[in-house]
Amino acid sequence: MSTNIRVQRICQHCGNDFTARTTVTKYCGDNCAKRAYKVRKRNEKINNSNRETKEIIRKPIEQIKAKEFLTVNETAILLGCSKRTAYRLIEKGTIKAVNLSERMTRVKREELDRLLS
């Protein structure tokens, strides 16, 4: 079944005027349709990559939150500060910590919850 519909449209890719034969035509020709498809696919890949990166960043924080005893480095990550600032808070007594040895300082998770609440 053929139709004699002629609709003036503007190409969604290049912005040029064209005459469409259907009411759903978006692009002036095959080249613009292919280029728009490539742009769409490229944006999908970028969005997927960004989503994966955010998940990778969030994953260690979720693992840290599950621990009962934290290292000073993990404490700093949860507080959003530097490792040196976390040590200062421990030295000042704001955060209670236990020195198991010279290089093994541990902070109880409840201490951070108490500090932040």
Image: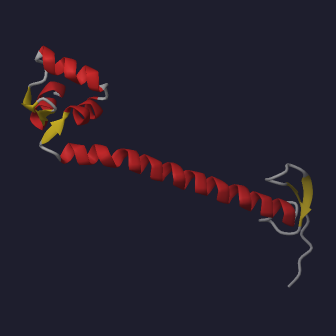
User: Is 40 located above or below residue 84 in the figure?
Assistant: below
Q: Where is residue 10 in the image (x, y as percent from the top left)?
A: 85, 52
Whether residue 26 is visible here, answered yes or no, is no
Looking at the image, which is closer to me, 14 or 74?
Answer: 74
Q: Does residue 66 lie above or below 94 as drawn? A: below
* Towards the viewer: 83 or 115: 83
Left or right side of 70 for 11: right
Q: Name the spot of residue 23 as percent of width and height, x first.
A: 80, 65
Q: Is residue 14 left or right of residue 110?
A: right
Query: Residue 32 placed where, x, y %?
Result: 83, 59
Residue at image point 10% right, 35% down: 110
Taking depth in this image into account, of 97 and 5 the one nearest to the observer is 97
Q: At x 12% / y 43%, what residue is drawn?
A: 68
Q: Could you tell me which quadrant the C terminus lies in?
A: top left
Q: Is residue 104 above or below residue 92?
A: below
The quarter of the displayed image where residue 64 is located: top left
In the rendered image, residue 76, in percent from the top left (x then y), is placed at: 26, 30
Does residue 52 show up? yes
Q: Closest to the observer: 1 or 94?
A: 94
In this rendering, position of residue 114 left or right of residue 3:
left
Q: Quadrant of the N terminus?
A: bottom right
Residue drawn at point x = 60 percent, y = 56 percent: 44
Q: Residue at x 76, y 58 (%)?
A: 36
- Point out the residue furthest to the bottom here: 1
